[in-house]
Amino acid sequence: EIVLTQSPVTQSLSPGDRATLSCRASQYVSSNLAWYQQKPGQAPRLLIYDASMRATGIPARFSGSGSGTDFTLTISSLEPEDSAVYYCQQRSIWPRTFGQGAKLEIK
Amino acid sequence: EVQLLQSGGGLVQPGGSLRLSCAASGFSFSNYAMSWVRQAPGKGLEWVSAISGGSGGSTYYAGSAKGRFTVSRDNSKNTLFLEMSSLRDEDTAVYYCAKWMEGHGDYLDHWGQGTLVTVSS
């Protein structure tokens, strides 16, 4: 099973700041990685797929990069509504797995 | 508009069984693979199971679900199911059904509202 480790687990930033969230895979996953956003009481929302492709309707301030084992989600200029938990997920090998989550707080 | 409407959660005793349903609309259900993902209270997401599109001839399970959970689909009713048996305390979670993204495999682009399963005596 592939383990995805996200860092930092929690970060607190201000509106307009740049956020960088990392996801490291225990094995090679090529570009088979997605990022999801989850707000309290809501289902997750797909942000990024294939490591760097924005899903439909996702604002341009969200971008993804990386391949192999190291991946990054960048939010270029934080908005208050970006406060959420973010998860990475791999689809390279069964069983699919998620990272443990990274909480982003907007001050 | 894609909609996934879930039902079937509730309180069940350890060792008991439960069937979750996920009624799909707004897309050609039979053409899409589907997944189940769960989230224990205050915890992260855990992938549970997946089923291929069409007849659903291919199914996949997390280790925690293998042998106890069965995923199936009824394309005539546009409905996905998760049959859970031998339930344990640690199966307590919100269960989500989710649709695979078109042309991009196991990325989940639409999710149900979630249904809470509580395993407790």
Image: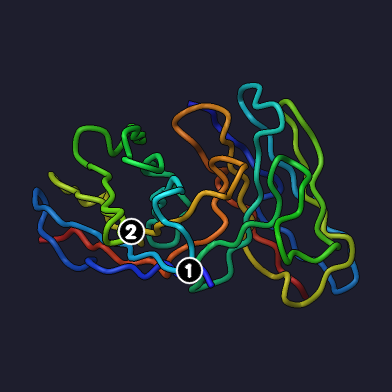
Label 1 environment density (alpha carbons within 10 Å; few <14, some 14–19, many ≥20): few
- Residue A85 horizontal side relative to residue A21, left or right: left
Q: Do labels 1 and 2 touch, CB within 8 Å?
A: no
Please identify the quarter of the rendering in which residue B40 is found.
Answer: bottom left
Q: Which one is nearer the viewer's eye here, B100 or B28?
A: B28
Q: CA distance from mark 1 to mark 2?
A: 27 Å
The residue labelled by disc 1 is B26
- Residue A53 horizontal side relative to residue A9, left or right: right
Q: Position of residue A45 (x, y in %)?
A: 60, 62
The residue labelled by disc 2 is B93
Q: Which one is nearer the viewer's eye here, A2 or B18?
A: B18
Q: Is residue B38 above or below residue A93?
A: below
Element at label 2: strand
Q: Position of residue B57 (x, y in %)?
A: 31, 34
Residue at image location 33% in from the left, 40% down from the top: B56
Element at label 1: loop
Residue at image location 20% in from the left, 49% down from the top: B83
How many numbered marks have been drawn onto this rendered protein structure? 2
